[in-house]
Image (cartoon, rainbow, N blue to C red):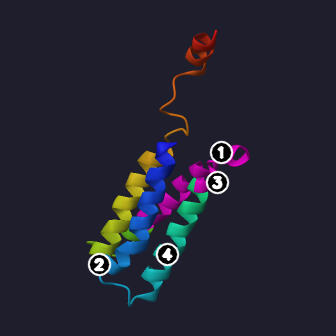
Amino acid sequence: MWGRVVEIMTAVWLAVSPFVFRVQSDATILWGDQIIALTICVLAGLSYWRPTRHAHLLILVIAVGLIAWGRLAGTPPPFVHQNHIVVGLFLLMIAIIPNHASYPPPVWQNESSS
């Protein structure tokens, strides 16, 4: 479940980034980043619970939204929106990783217990 941990770490970066880029005076960016980061953390956390183990796939929708928000912000996008594009692309790569990607296949697990 290392992919979910990386998603949470990325959400922390997204929450801190308005302060790093000194745009915390822009309420839209500040609150948008905070709400998006919280949503990513919740979805990544829900993936640990078996009934909602595929909740992290909804992060793909958030990632596409971040990319669109960053890209539609202007040409060229300001640095804070470039961050949104990069974070969105990174989340696209991480969110498709299955929860148990580092475990051996079930067939191998069954053979080792026999």
**Which residue is label 1 attached to?**
53
Q: Residue at x 54, y 38 (%)?
A: 98
Q: Residue at x 48, y 51 (%)?
A: 5
**Viewer-closest of 62 and 12:** 12
For label 2, the SS is: loop
**Which residue is label 3 attached to?**
46
Res. 69 mark: none
Res. 34 mark: 4
Amino acid at pointer 4: Gln
Amino acid at pointer 1: Arg
47 part of magenta stretch = yes
For label 4, the SS is: helix
Say if residue 71 shows up in the picture: no
- Gap between marks 3 and 2, in whole Å? 30 Å
Circle 3 Cα neighbour tier, 10 Å, few/some/many (<14 / 14–19 / ≥20): some
Q: Are marks 3 and 1 in contact (CB under 8 Å)?
A: no
**Viewer-closest of 72 and 85:** 85
Instruction: Identify whether 87 is placed above or below 109.
Output: below
Amino acid at pointer 2: Phe
Q: Position of residue 33 (x, y in %)?
A: 46, 74
- In magenta, the rendered stretch is 45-68
Instruction: Identify whether 23 is placed above or below 102.
Output: below
Q: First in sequence, mark 2 or 4: give its number.
A: 2
Q: First in sequence, mark 1 or 4: give its number.
A: 4
**Which residue is label 2 attached to?**
21
Overall secondary structure of the magenta section: helix
Q: First in sequence, mark 2 or 1: give its number.
A: 2
Circle 4 Cα neighbour tier, 10 Å, few/some/many (<14 / 14–19 / ≥20): some
- Badge nearest the viewer, 3 or 2: 3
- Gap between marks 1 and 4, in whole Å? 24 Å
Q: Quadrant of the C terminus?
A: top right
Q: First in sequence, mark 3 or 4: give its number.
A: 4
